[in-house]
Image (tube, helix red, strand yellow):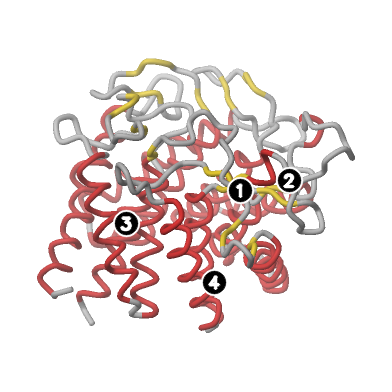
Amino acid sequence: MTSSTVAQYTALYRDNLLNDVLPFWQRFSPDREHGGFFTCLDRTGEVYDTDKFIWLQARQVWTFSMLYNRVGSLFPDQKADWLGMAQLGADFLQKHGRAEDGSWYFSTTRDGKPLVQPYNIFSDCFATMAFGQLSLATGRDEYAHLAESTFRQILARRDNPKGAWNKAVSGTRPLKNFALPMILCNLALEIEPLLDKPLVEQTIDECIHEVMTVFFDPDLGLIRENVTPDGRMSDSFEGRLLNPGHAIEAMWFSMDLAVRRGDRALVDKAVQITLDTLTYAWDTDFGGILYFMDASGHPPQQLEWDQKLWWVHVETLISLLKGYQLTGNQACWEWFERVHAYTWSHFPDPINGEWFGYLNRRGEVLLPLKGGKWKGCYHVPRGLYQCWQVLENLQNL
């Protein structure tokens, strides 16, 4: 690694964020008639479906609020538009996003009529993040209250996130999923200024234990996506499931928590899990990271198991850079350059801007969309921002 190499990477991640990805969403996603954002955008930015998915609305509010808060002062010509974008989404969410009990719907029509019940607690998670960041940007107490109250509802639902919409028969094969404790690791830090310190510390303690002890299988050296309520392995499709992207994303959340607490052992464990997961999940035939795997080597249940997804690669880049920054482990840098080369040669669209989301195993574009039901203005800009910041820090060492 040379200083000139780091400087080139820094400029690439920063410029792609500011001059490519954000302008794409600023140009094509705002719904000026009904509020909120269009997320179903084709390769050129044309809207191909007008349904609004609450978690993607909230993610986009968070993205523009976060950038306004953290780097807005560096870009005075852009910060007002960033805040305006966040406000556009927040107004729609406040007006149309919640059910009577305060939980957040999964989706609505373009004009805000509810389509899908609030079965998915991740709508609540990203609403918490969105209004937490927006409260910091605007100083408005109503946003802070909305973030805090939603966060407390999440904690109340954490043992049965889907509630009445859980399709599994109760008691037959109870399992708990990795995704919620993973997100709570990040969520607690996101809205820490709005919470009592004991609640923050308790949530962090519980999340670190869940992620690093309950879901981590020391025999595999990997994170399982589902375990029994007492943390054991279930010999079933769900119990054998590995989700490398989730595991690696959780590791940079854990590194952030470790830095906050001065816990070097947690840093080292998170870095090792990142490297072990990446070694396990890297496609040695075609390159890139496999989407799903079976821990016992059986055929995965998910038919899309061998696809290469944008968010998996973006989150891996963040974890590798943070791991290198915190430990100097050369394997992190070597893997970063390898994953970077694959990612930047396959996902960004040099013609129309933004990034493709879905590749087949050979690395060919499978779906030419830039946004849809699952991909929005979140993982790519967050990843570009995070990598830019870490690389800039490395450059200044």
Mark 1 or 3, nearer chain start: 1
* Residue receiving disc 1: 296
Mark 2 or 4, nearer chain start: 2
Nearer the observer: mark 1 or 3; the answer is 1
What separation in Å lies between label 4 and label 3 (alpha carbons)? 19 Å
Mark 2 or 3, nearer chain start: 2
- Residue at point 20% right, 50% down? 77
Identify the image quadrant of residue 40: top left
Mark 4 or 3, nearer chain start: 4
| 221 sits to left or right of 325 | right
* Residue receiving disc 4: 257
Name the residue nearer the viewer: 195 or 206: 206
Mark 1 or 4, nearer chain start: 4
Q: Position of residue 168 (x, y in %)?
A: 80, 32
- Kindly state the secondary structure of the residue where label 2 is placed: loop
- Kindly state the secondary structure of the residue where label 3 is placed: helix
**Is the residue 197 above or below the residue 108 in the image?**
below
Q: Position of residue 59 (x, y in %)?
A: 47, 42
Q: Label 4 is placed on what type of residue?
A: Leu
Name the residue nearer the viewer: 130 or 251: 251
| 175 sits to left or right of 344 | right
